[in-house]
Amino acid sequence: MFQSGGSVSFYPLFTAEDIGLRKDVTVEHAIKVFLYIGEAIASRWVQMPKGILLLQAVPDDPQSGAIYLYDRERQIFYFACFDQGRDDSLSVEEFEQLVTEYDLVSWTANPALLPAFNEPARA
């Protein structure tokens, strides 16, 4: 099946603890701190019981989005990287297309399939 950005990889960036958060942090607070560190906003937010998919963007720049996935159980933030496409200058419309095209909601529903800090997972 053709995928516009080639294959997608999810790269673990850091844990909630790595950015100074306690193990009992709420999901909302973890995302708020993540966005604060990136000086960004969440243009889109898809929440599932085990994961959250975000389009993080620079305020007032609709073409600056990047896709991140937060594993709620392991408290790991991941960056979604497309090997044949842009992954850090996405619009809301492109995010919505990629979510459907790559079935990113499935990864969000089951982030345990993604690596902790080993080799990148390929979708």
Image: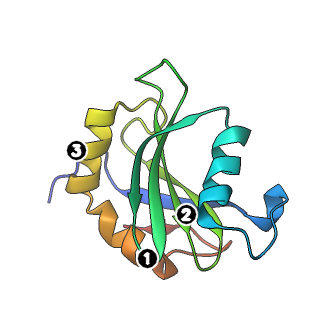
Gap in angstroms between the C-alphas marked 1 and 2: 11 Å
- Determine the image quadrant of residue 21: bottom right
Residue at the spot 32% in from the left edge and 35% down from the top edge: 92
| Amino acid type assigned to the residue bearing label 2 in the image | Tyr
Q: Quadrant of the N terminus?
A: bottom left
| 99 on left or right of 50 | left
In the image, residue 5 above or below residue 57? below
Return the residue nearer the eye: 110 or 80: 110
Residue density around tag 3, few if under 14, some if 14–19, many if 20 or more, within 10 Å: few
| Amino acid type assigned to the residue bearing label 1 in the image | Pro
| Mark 3–mark 2 CB contact (< 8 Å) | no
| Amino acid type assigned to the residue bearing label 3 in the image | Gln
How far from the left and from the top, in percent, is residue 107? 38, 70
Residue at the spot 67% in from the left edge and 37% down from the top edge: 38
SS of the residue under disc 3: helix
Which circle, 1 or 2, is nearer the viewer?
Answer: 1
Residue identifier under label 3: 97
Q: Identify the mark nearer the N-term, 3 or 1.
A: 1
Residue density around tag 2, few if under 14, some if 14–19, many if 20 or more, within 10 Å: many
Name the residue at the top extreme. Answer: 60
How far from the left and from the top, in percent, is residue 40? 60, 33
Residue at the spot 80% in from the left edge and 66% down from the top edge: 17
- Determine the image quadrant of residue 29: bottom right
Q: Identify the mark nearer the N-term, 3 or 2.
A: 2
Residue at the spot 35% in from the left edge and 30% down from the top edge: 91
Residue identifier under label 1: 49
How far from the left and from the top, in percent, is residue 33? 71, 49
Q: Which mark is residue 70?
A: 2
Q: Which mark is residue 11?
A: none
